[in-house]
Image: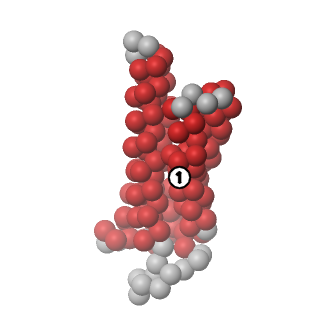
Amino acid sequence: MDWKARLPLLAAALWWGSLTAIGFMAVPLLFTNASSPALAGSLAAKLFQGQAWLSMGCGLLILMGARHADGTATLGWAAGAVAYVLLGMLAALLQEFAIAPRIVARQDLRFWHTAGTAVYAAQWLCALLVLWKVAGFSRSATS
């Protein structure tokens, strides 16, 4: 399999892996070890901002791989992974432009943290499904 065929798999792995590392390890460690919750929150906001843009980049790379070898688009690519890519990218945009600004402004923190957690979890699930589907597609394409 050439590098162009492997690119969507690598992008899906990076997307899901980075969501997992930031959401389940880095941010909890920040809140456990930072000198204040305000500092931890500020640093977490920067991590989530970077993650949103990484998610968009990975999603675009995966979508670029959703084409046949001759360059024509296919809706059935990787057993429907495209829909999950688009939903995950939408979740990243919602997180960055709708939810994060309200958390930073300390606007109804309980509600917006809950919404942010739900949207992040939805993005994580979308990325996992994309990785699962793309990995299965890549394996069957090499057989």
Report x, y in % for residue 25: 46, 29
In the picture, measured across the screen, residue 116 lies left or right of residue 48, that is right
Colour mapping = secondary structure
State the count of labels: 1
Q: Residue furthest top?
A: 35
Report x, y in % for residue 123: 57, 48
Report x, y in % for residue 141: 46, 72
Report x, y in % for residue 125: 60, 48
Towards the viewer: 50 or 109: 109
Residue at 53% in and 39% down = 101
Relative to 48, say whether 34 is above or below: above
Image quarter (top left, top right, bottom left or bottom right) of the N terminus: bottom left
Q: Residues within 10 Å of mark 1 (few under 14, many from 20)?
A: some
Relative to 113, say whether 59 is above or below: below
Relative to 6, say whether 72 is above or below: below
Report if residue 54 is visible in the image: yes
Residue at 46% in and 81% down = 68
Residue at 38% in and 70% down = 5
Corner quadrant of residue 30: top left
In the picture, measured across the screen, residue 24 lies left or right of residue 114, that is left
Mark 1, residue position: 93
Corner quadrant of residue 109: top right
Q: Residue furthest right?
A: 111
Corner quadrant of residue 87: bottom right
Towards the viewer: 15 or 114: 114
In the picture, measured across the screen, residue 111 lies left or right of residue 69, that is right
Element marked by disc 1: helix
In the picture, measured across the screen, residue 41 lies left or right of residue 103, that is left
Residue at 61% in and 65% down = 83
Towards the viewer: 54 or 110: 110
Amino acid type for the residue under numbered disc 1: Leu
